[in-house]
Amino acid sequence: MMYNFAIDPLLTGKVLWTPLLIVLLKVVVVFAVGLVATMLMVWFERKVIAGMQNRIGPNKAGPFGILQTLADGIKLFFKEDLIPERSDRFVFKLAPYLAFVPAFLTFAIIPLGGDFRGDNDGLVTWFGQQTRVQLADPPIGILFALAISSIAIYGIMLAGWSSGSKYPLLGSVRASAQMVSYEAALGLSVAAVVLVSGTLSTSGIVARQSSLGNWNVIVTGIVPFFIFMIAATAELNRPPFDLVEAEQELVGGFNTEYASLRFALFYLAEFMNTVTMSALIVTLFFGGPQPISVGSLTVDIPIIGNAFEGTIWLLLKVLVFLYIYVWFRATLPRFRYDQLMDLGWKVLIPASLGWFILLAAQRVGQDAGWDRYVVTIATVLILLVCYSLLALAQRTSENERKRDGVMF
Amino acid sequence: MGLFVFVCAAAMVLVGAVGVVTRNNPVHAALSLVLTLFGIAVLFVANNAHFLAAVQVIVYAGAIVVLFLFVIMLLGVDQAEDLSLEPLTVQRPLALVVSIGVTGVIIAAVLKSQDALFARGTGIDSATLQDADANIRQLSRSIFTDYVFAFEVTSVLLLIAVVGTVVMSRRQHGQHVEESV
Amino acid sequence: MFAALFSVFVTAADWVSPSIDYHALAPEIILAGGVVVVLLLDLFTSENNKWMLGPVTSFTLLGSFIPILTLALSDSGTRSLFDGRYVVDNFSLTMKGLFVLAGYLVVLLSSDYLREGDFYEGEYWILMLSSLLGMVMMASSRDLVSIFVSLEFLSIPAYMMAAWRKRDLRSNEAGVKYFLLGVFASALMLYGMSLLYGISNSTLLTDIGKYVSGEMSAVRAVAILFVVVGFAFKISAVPFHTWAPDTYEGAPTPVTAFLSVASKAAGFVALLTVVYVGFPNASEVWQPVFWIFAALTMTVGNVMALRQTNIVRMLAYSSISQGGFILMPLAIAGEGDSAGAALRAVVTYLLVYAATNLGVFAVVIAVSHKTRSGAISSYGGLFSYAPGLAIVMTIFMASLAGIPPLGGWIGKFGSFQALVSAGTTWGYALAVIGAVNTVIAFGYYGNVMREMWMRPVPDGDTTHVVVPSAITVALGLTTFATLLMGILPGLVLHFGDLANLAGAFGG
C-alpha cells in the first residue's frame, strides 16, 4: 500500500537517506531553537518587566543576566523531587509531560523561514533536495495547531486534579473552563483566515500574504486578529487571564504541589507556548517569514540569502508580539472569573462568528457577482438584528435571574 | 511501515478501550478513552484522512473528554464505586456470555468474508491524492452537496441539545416532588 | 468602506451549489422555523403570556401539514433530492402526515397537563417540535447518514421529554433508562452501518441494496442484523423492550402517548425504509429475525400486560404487543410478491394504531385528572358518572383488541391477510401465533371494559369528570378516525396503497 506523505515534498516518492537525515536535522534544530527561544523568552520577560517597573532585573548570570534561566534550571534540577501523599502518582507524573510535549509540537508546523518570493512557494534547496524551512507542512496545518492547543488542556487539568489538594484542583477547573471557552473564539477567527486563504496549510497561508496589503490582518479586516490575540492570551493563561495561578486566591494554582524538574517542565511549557502562539499569530496574520513589501518595493536585507532572510523577518515579527505579551503582563490587572466568561461567551464568540458571516457573505456575493456594498449593508443589517436579539435575550435572562434571587 | 503503524494504533485503541471498562477510577477511565481516541486519529492519518484525524482530536480528545473530566472533577465522583451489589445475579454471567458470543460472531464474520470488505475499499483515487488538499476538498464537497440537508439539520439538533441540557440542569423555584400518574 | 478590504478571495472554479426543491422540503423547513419561533417567543414573553406557546406549536404543526397536502396532491410524482438521499414519495408523505397529526393530538393532550403541573412550557414545545422534525425527516431519508441524523433528532428530545418531571424519581428513571438503552441501540446500529458502508462504499440505501444481495457472506448478515437490532430497540421489540414499561410509566402521560405512537411509528418507518430499499435481496437474513421478533413481542407483551394493575403500565405492554402485530407482515415480506401487501399492512396498522392509542391516552389523562390514580381499578363505574368517556374508551379498547367494525380490526385483518397470502409454512405458523395472541389480548382490554361498565365506583365519588376542551377535541378526532377507518376501510387502504416506495425492490 502506498502512503502519501504530503507533509513534506522531501518525503514524496522513495525515501532515501539524504532526505531522512535532513528531516532528522530539522527535528533537532527545531527542538533546540524552541528550547533556546524559551530560555531567552524567560529572560526577556523578566528584563522587560523590570524595565517597565524601574528595576534592573536579572543581571548576574552571564552578560545582561542572559544566562539567568539556565541557572534557574540547574537549581530546579537539583531540588528535591516530592510527590504529595494524597496524589494520584501515575497521573501526577504524567501531567508535566502532557503540558510540555504539546508546547513543542505546535512549533513543528510553523514556517520558520524559506523563500516565498516569486513562484518559490517557500521551497528551498538543501543538499540537492527541495524542502521547506519548517518541520512539517501537513495539509491540515492550522487544524493541527488547534488540535494541539486543545490537547494542552490535559496537562494543566490533570496536574491540578492529581495533586490531591484543593487549590490546584480549583486552579485546574478554572483553567480548563477558560481554555475550552476561548477555544471557540480562537477557532472562529482562524476560520476567517482560512476563508480568505482557501487553504489550511500554514505554508499556503504564508504564501498568500506576499505584500503588506495582502497580509491577513488587513485582508480579514483586523477584527479576527484582535479576537485571536485576546483568545490566544486566554489560551496561554497569561495575564490578564491568569486566573489559573491567581496567587491571592489559589496559592500557585494548578502547579502548587509540583517541585523540581516537574515544575520546570510546566514553567518551560508556559513560555514555550507564548513563543509558539506569537509565531502562530505572525504566520496567520502577518505574513510569517515574508519580508515587508508594499507594491513592488520590498524591504530587503542584503547579503543574507532569501531563505534565511525569512527567518530573520519571522524573528523580528515574533519579537514584537512577545513584547506585547510582556507589556500586557506589566500593565493589565487580572480579570474576575465572571468577567472572563462574559468576555469569552458574550463578546468574543458572537463577534468572531458575526465577522466570519460577514466575510462569508462577501465571498458568496463575489461568487454570485452581487454588488459588494449591497451585500455588506444587508449582512450588517442582519447581524445588527441578531445582535439586538442577543442583547435582549441577555437582558431578559438577567432580569429573570434577579427576580428569582439567583445572583451569579 | 503501514502494518507497523496499524498495529501500534490498533494496540492503542484496544488497550484504551479495555482500560475504559476496567479502570475503577473514572479519571483513569477517561484518560484511557483519550488513548483510544488518539489511536483512532492515528488510524485516520494512516488512511490519508488528515482532516478527520484533526477533527477527531479537536472534538473528541480536546472537547468531549475534557468536559467528561470537568464533570468528574466538579462533581467529585472520582472515587471507585462499589459494584458488588447486584439485584439480578444472572445478569453479569449472562452479559459475559452474550458479549463473548457477539465478539466471536463479528470476528468470524469479518474473517470469513474479507473479500467482500476488500473488494469495495477503493476510497479516494490515487490521482486526486497527489493534491495535498484532496481529502479536505472531497469531504467538504460531499458535505455541502449530497449531505447538505443532514449537515444543516444537525445544527438544529445541537441547538436542541443545548436547550434540553439547560432545561434538565436548571434550578427552578417552587418545584416540589410530584406523584406520577 | 471596509468592503474594499475583502479583495483577495481564492475562487473554487468548479463549485456548483446543489439545487434544492424547497417545496419538497417545506414541511421540514416550517417545523424548523417553528422551533426557532417558539424558542424566541419563550424568551421574550412574560410568565402570563406563556400559554400562547402551545397554540403557536399547534399552528406550526398544522402549517407543516399544508405542504404535505399540496405535495400529495401535486401530480409530479416522486421527488428525489440530493442524488436520491432524500425522497418524497407517497409512503413518506403518508407517514409525515401521520407524524404531524399525531404531534398535533399530543399538543392537545399536553396543553392542560403542562399548565397544571407548572412544568417548563416553552422548552417542552421546542423539544416536541424538534422530535417531530426528526420523524418527518426519517420518513424521507434514504441514506445511512440522514437516517442516523433523523434517528438522533427524534430520540434526543424524547429522552429529555421522558425525564420532564425533574423532581419525580420515576420520571428521572424513565429518562435515564430510555437514554442509556437508546444510545446503546444507536451504537449497535452505527456499527452495522459502518459494516454496510464497508461492503458497499456508499451510504445510499439503493447502492447498498445492490451489494447486499446474492450469496450472503457472513459480514453482510452481521451488518444487517446489527442495523435491525438497533431499530428493534426503537420499536421496543422483545427482547429489546425492557426500557419501555418503566419509561412509559415514569414519563408524563402525554409524553408516553407521544413515545408509544409517534416514536414507535418512526422506528417502523426507518425499519421499512432500510429493509425495503437497503436489503430487499437479503430476505433470508431478516425474515427469520422478524419472525422471531414478532412472535416474541406479541406473546411477551400480551402475557405481561395481563398481570398489570396500573393502566399506563398495561398500555405500555399493550403497545409492545401491538408492535409485534405490526411486525408480523415483515416476516414474510420477502416471499414472492408479498412485499407490497406487507408494506400496506404495516402502514395501515400504524395509522389505525396511532389514532386509537392516542385516544386511549386522552381518556387516561382525562380520567386521572379526577381520580389522581393510575390503577386500573380506579376506572370502576366510570360509565355511571362519565358515560361519554366510558363509551369512547370502550371503542378504543375494542379497536385495540381488533373487534370489527372498528379501525383496529382493519389493521389486524390486513396483517393476517398478508401473512396468509404469502402461503408459506412460516407465514401460517406466525398467523396462528398472532391469532392466539389476539384472543389473549381480549383478557386485559376486556378487563378495563368490565371495570368501567360493571364494577362499582371504588370510593363512591361520582362527581363529574371535567374534560378540558383541548382533550375533548383530541377525543373527538381520534374517535372519529377510529370509527371511520373501521367503517370505510377503503379510505385507509387508499392511503396505504404504496406499491411504489421509491427505490424499493429495484422499482
Image: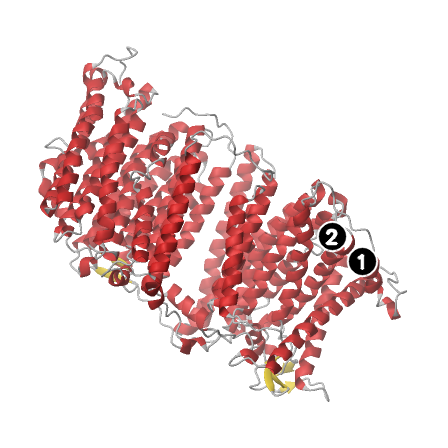
Q: Tell me, for residue A333, which label it has, or none.
A: 2
Image quadrant assignment for residue A274: bottom right
Considering the numbered disc 2 on the image, is that residue within a helix, a strand or a loop? loop
- Locate residue B139, reporting x and y percent: 42, 67
Is residue A265 visible in the rendered image? The answer is yes
Q: Are marks 2 and 1 on the same chain?
A: yes
Classify A377 as above or below B23. below
The colour style of the image is: secondary structure
Residue A348, percent from left and from top: 58, 56
How many neighbours does mark 2 have within 10 angstroms: few (below 14), some (14-19), or many (20 or more)? few
Q: Quadrant of the C terminus of chain A?
A: top right
Q: Is residue A170 left or right of residue A370?
A: right
Residue at x 30% of width, y 63% of height: C82
Residue matched to label 1 = A77
**Reading the chain from its start, which is encountered first: label 2 or label 1?**
1
Q: Which image quadrant for residue A365?
A: bottom left
Which kind of residue does numbered mark 1 sit on?
Answer: Phe
Which quadrant of the structure image shows residue C371?
top left
Say whether residue C409 is left or right of residue B51: left
